């Protein structure tokens, strides 16, 4: 499987996520800067030593932000798909099967970013799931992901809050071998710092049995 199919069909939507009844290919959507739907899933591993948040380093073959560190799972909704069906991305990217009922909605997000050959305009549904497991139980797929990391949630928050300059992140390479990388803000998808902080704080609150107001399209 390639990192992405340029002919994969996407439903077009407006900037509020309302479907327009039109379909275009990934290539055309990014070329023309059309609004389309995407899904983010944040995965937290709950266990000894405190909760750990799963981060992925994107494959170098990706058409957007290759080689940069990102949310646990990120993908587009194909034409006709629901969020439930789009959770297939979790298995395709990190080898994790997730049911919609096992997720919590963190909100919705609108992004506009210049990408090679065009503009990426997405309305993202942002979900999270907490699982009892270890990083070694996940399977990073080489076509999608260069590595997976599982730093402590507290440590990840300290980095995004500017309380520390770097983050020691234990992880796995695509062969399942253990790695330890030191991450700094420049390793992450640019422009997402405030978004990451909002999501990590929401995860922290969720683990305490509390909730934050969901992100809203504004």
Image: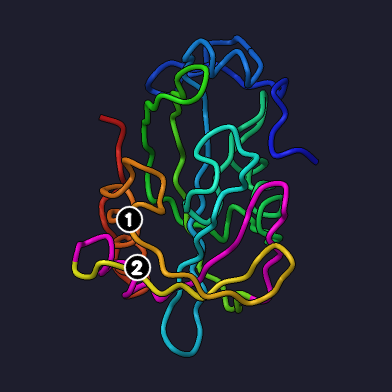
Q: How is the image coloured?
A: rainbow
- Residue at image point 48% right, 90% down: 48
**Label 1: few (<14), some or many (≥20) within 10 Å?**
some
Mark 1 against mark 2, which lies toward the viewer? 1
Describe the element under mark 2 as helix, strand or loop: helix
- Residue at image point 32% right, 60% down: 202
Report x, y in % for residue 62.
61, 38
Q: Where the C terminus falls, by quadrant?
A: top left
* Quarter of the view holding residue 2: top right
Viewer-nearest residue: 176 or 37: 176
Question: Gap between marks 1 and 2, in whole Å?
Answer: 10 Å
Image position of 218 (left or right of 133)? left
Q: Residue furthest right?
A: 1
Q: Which residue is mark 1?
A: 185
Report x, y in % for residue 203.
36, 64
Q: Earlier in the sequence, mark 1 or mark 2?
A: 2
Report x, y in % for residue 71.
47, 53
Image position of 133 (left or right of 208)? right
* Quarter of the view holding residue 12: top right
Q: Which residue is mark 2?
A: 156
Residue 94 position (above or below residue 180): above
Look at the image and say whether residue 153 sits in the magenta stretch: yes
Q: Which residues are magenta?
A: 136-162
- Residue at image point 51% right, 85% down: 47
Residue 41 position (above or below residue 4): below
Viewer-nearest residue: 193 or 203: 193
Residue 171 position (above or below residue 1): below
């Amino acid at each position: 499987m390639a990192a992405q199919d340029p002919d994969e069909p996407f439903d077009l939507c407006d900037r509020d996520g309302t479907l327009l009844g039109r379909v275009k290919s990934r290539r055309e959507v990014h070329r023309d800067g059309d609004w389309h739907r995407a899904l983010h899933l944040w995965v937290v591993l709950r266990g000894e030593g405190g909760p750990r948040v799963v981060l992925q380093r994107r494959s170098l073959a990706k058409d957007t932000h290759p080689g940069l560190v990102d949310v646990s799972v990120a993908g587009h909704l194909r034409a006709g798909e629901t969020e439930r069906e789009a959770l297939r991305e979790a298995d395709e990217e990190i080898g994790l099967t997730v049911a919609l009922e096992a997720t919590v909605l963190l909100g919705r997000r609108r992004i506009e970013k210049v990408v090679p050959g065009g503009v990426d305009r997405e309305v993202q549904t942002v979900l999270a799931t907490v699982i009892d497991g270890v990083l070694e139980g996940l399977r990073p797929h080489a076509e999608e992901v260069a590595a997976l990391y599982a730093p402590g949630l507290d440590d990840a928050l300290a980095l995004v809050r500017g309380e520390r300059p770097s983050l020691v992140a234990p992880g796995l390479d695509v062969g399942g071998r253990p790695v330890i990388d030191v991450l700094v803000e420049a390793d992450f998808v640019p422009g997402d710092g405030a978004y990451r902080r909002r999501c990590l704080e929401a995860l922290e609150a969720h683990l305490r049995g509390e909730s934050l107001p969901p992100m809203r399209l504004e």
